[in-house]
Amino acid sequence: MPRARFAAACLGLVAAALLGCSRGDAPSPGAGSPAEPACACAPAQVVDPTLLAFLSRARAAHHAADVALDAGDRAAAIRALEGIIAAPRPPGTPPEVVEVTADTYARLAELRSEAGEFDAAARDVEAGLKLAPAPSHYEGHLYEVAGVVEERRAKALEERGDRDGAAGARRRAVALLERAISIQDRVITEALKGAPETPR
């Protein structure tokens, strides 16, 4: 699945989970005592409709970017994603909003670097890193994208005959990608600490 469609699918899963928690469906007979909450997320939890609206808007924007890219219009795709960054956000800065925004910055950086806008792409990564929780998949992915940006910069500099500049960009790419790997290793290790042991 292309990354763009994967991002939209993830947004859909988050929204679906939140909707499931907000419905408050009655438990089926025999499912437990009347005091048990209908949703496992939290008792009597009500999801902020502005959060659901933001996630739906973000999902639509990623789909719009997909359509624009399919038509060969990278500029329109970037405008669609920039709309997520500029959109009003739910109060309190829910973690879902932070994660979606950070991931959108990563995708913007990918698109800009494909067009040779390496400095703008690096600024997108920097903005995303200010939002992404650390350590997290989102932080690791942003460093991965930063490495890709420098890799593409190196190729562009090499084509222009700037071998020293290309060598420097390659060194930065390797360092950034190694940092991405290190962060994702930490994320996996921390997640496995709380995972139940698989019976042999």
Image (cartoon, grey):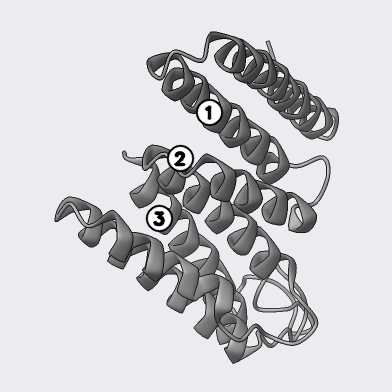
Give the alpha-carbon distance from disc 2 to disc 1, as whole Å: 8 Å
Mark 1 sits on what residue? Answer: 148
Residue 9 is tagged as: 3
User: Residue sitting at 54 percent across and 33 percent down?
Assistant: 149
Give yes or no for contact between labels 2 and 1 (Cβ–Cβ under 8 Å): yes
**Which percent across, then down, holds residue 192?**
78, 28
Q: Amino acid at mark 1?
A: Val
Q: Secondary structure at mark 2?
A: helix
The percent position of residue 32, horizontal first and vertical second, equals 70, 72
As rendered, which of 71 and 48 lies closer to the eye?
71
- Drawn side of residue 14 relative to residue 70, left or right: right
Mark 3 falls on what kind of element?
A: helix
Q: Residues within 10 Å of mark 1 (few under 14, many from 20)?
A: many
Q: Dot 3: few (<14), some (14–19), or many (≥20) neighbours within 10 Å? A: some
What residue appears at the point 51 percent right and 27 percent down from the top-left corner? 153
The residue mark sitting in front, 3 or 2, is 2
Q: Secondary structure at mark 1?
A: helix
Residue furthest to the left in view is 71
Looking at the image, tell me whether mark 3 or mark 2 is earlier in sequence order: 3
Q: Which mark is residue 113?
A: 2
**Residue 3 visible (yes or no):** yes
Asked whether 200 or 127 is in front, the reply is: 127
Q: CA distance from mark 3 to mark 1?
A: 23 Å
| Residue at the (53%, 57%) spot, across then down | 104
Judge the density around disc 2: few (<14), some (14-19), many (≥20) Cα neighbours within 10 Å: many
Above or below 16: residue 188: above
Residue at the farthest front position? 161
Q: CA distance from mark 3 to mark 2?
A: 24 Å
Residue flagged by tag 2: what amino acid is it?
Ser
Q: Is residue 41 above or below residue 180?
A: below
Tell me which amino acid carries mark 3: Ala
